[in-house]
Amino acid sequence: MNPISKAEENHLKAIFNLCEETGKRASTNAIAKIMQTKAASVTAMIIRLSGKEIPLVNHQKHKGVRLTEAGKKLATNLIRKHRLWETFLVEKLNFSWDEVHEIAEELEHIKAEKLIDRLDEFLGRPKFDPHGDPIPDADGNFTFRKQILLTDLAENQAAVVVGVLDDSPSFLQYLNKLKLVLGSKVQILERVEYDGSNRILLNDQQEQVLTNKVCQNLYVKTL
Amino acid sequence: MNPISKAEENHLKAIFNLCEETGKRASTNAIAKIMQTKAASVTAMIIRLSGKEIPLVNHQKHKGVRLTEAGKKLATNLIRKHRLWETFLVEKLNFSWDEVHEIAEELEHIKAEKLIDRLDEFLGRPKFDPHGDPIPDADGNFTFRKQILLTDLAENQAAVVVGVLDDSPSFLQYLNKLKLVLGSKVQILERVEYDGSNRILLNDQQEQVLTNKVCQNLYVKTL
DNA sequence: TACTATTTTTAGCCTAATCTAAAAAATATT
DNA sequence: AATATTTTTTAGATTAGGCTAAAAATAGTA
Ligand SMILES: [Mn+2]
Ligand SMILES: [Mn+2]
Ligand SMILES: [Mn+2]
Ligand SMILES: [Mn+2]
């Protein structure tokens, strides 16, 4: 069959992410939710993807789906493209980290390996995107980093914000208001029993209160 | 109806270019040739484009098609995007002018006005693309330039290459070999009766022979 | 002008990607 | 274990954007 379509690519990415998160086969419903389509449509797509000369997914009726090696390769490359474009938009075109996801969602589907190679080079072969997510290299290898959620940081232990778990615009815009960015230094002064909130020290200067929900979505690296 | 599709955009661009060139309504066959489809498919597309709430083309059965104001606006914006992306690829990612058309053909369909504004700014609001074609501004205004074909340059009159009429990779690659680029200084030393070839002086240094076909596809500006 | 050749449109099909509604399978709950 | 609920698949329909073949309109020529 023909070159892989945008819809096919987006399904592969959804399946990749689901399997990474859960460690299990991805369910039809879960995929449909991400794709904003219906389960029946996902079933149809899965049948197409598994019916290629080189199958991209492995499907067992009623038992979910996982990517084949070929599917993983494609999904990883798509993620690479997505994150490189996001980096370009923030680093070169001065977009804010909350604006780039949607645009990169389109740019990632441009098919030109040379373009991505050159873009990577132009950006200085970045290892992480504007949300702190690792950018796989051309061979599909991700850089791993010792990071924990802010909820798991010991009291009074100094750390630096290195990423976000939730990268929705609303969360990112809220972080903008809090002046919390990648690279911000944080330290938990006190975990308040009463409402589960956290008094933190930001950049060694400013005391601030973060709800537990915020802390659950911030990755930090201890110093 | 929904946001304009890639296929619709490409048809608008084809119609725009045909009408600009010929000054007449575009024929179904001519459009099909550019789109690499069949006349019947073009007729179907034209019916769709003229049937929008705001029609994008004006169609008279058997008498060809032309763009409405709304269609012209869209086509011009598409050309703007195409040429800005080409400029980006050459200026920032070090692509050669013969490699960029195909990639820009895809990038031009990314829908994000802010992206194009920012890209334009990042590139320094260029007025011409790597092939010397004018880049319309955000309002759709093209910069005009007094240029003539090298065939029409007077003998011994000094001029600078400012653009190409044919921007096919094969012609551009041939120009690469001849070391003829935008900005090259040229002067016709002699038009040879015998075979219609042209002895030229390149950059005040080097004598070279160009066929008439090459001269017919080079735009120059006199000094 | 009448006939021929070319161009355009119409009619009917096809595939990709979606949908809804119903059937079937798997899972959960008495 | 039997029944109820949820999930997945199947069946059938739709829309965009292509195709081929045939019909209709226009243009060219004798
Ligand atoms: Mn996408
Ligand atoms: Mn990201
Ligand atoms: Mn295009
Ligand atoms: Mn160009």
Image (tube, coloured by chain):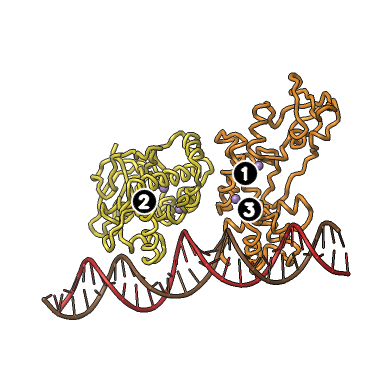
Chain colours: A yellow, B orange, C red, D brown
Q: Are marks 1 and 2 on the same chain?
A: no
Task: Tell me residue A62's x, y (percent).
Answer: 27, 63
Task: Give the foreground label among 1 and 3.
Answer: 3
Residue A125 versus residue A118: which sits nearer the camera?
A118
Amino acid type at circle 1 is Leu
Residue with the mark numbered 1: B84
Q: Earlier in the sequence, mark 1 or mark 3?
A: 3
Amino acid type at circle 2 is Leu
Q: Are marks 1 and 3 in contact (CB under 8 Å)?
A: no
Q: Can you see residue A39?
A: yes
Tag of residue B35? 3
Residue with the mark numbered 2: A56
Could you tell me which residue is drawn at 37 percent across and 42 percent down?
A: A134
Task: Tell me residue A4's x, y (percent).
Answer: 45, 51
Tag 3, which secondary structure? helix
Tag 2, which secondary structure? loop
Above or below, B189 against B95 in this view is: above
Q: Are marks 1 and 3 on the same chain?
A: yes
Could you tell me which residue is drawn at 38 percent across and 48 percent down?
A: A75
Could you tell me which residue is drawn at 62 percent across and 52 percent down?
A: B36
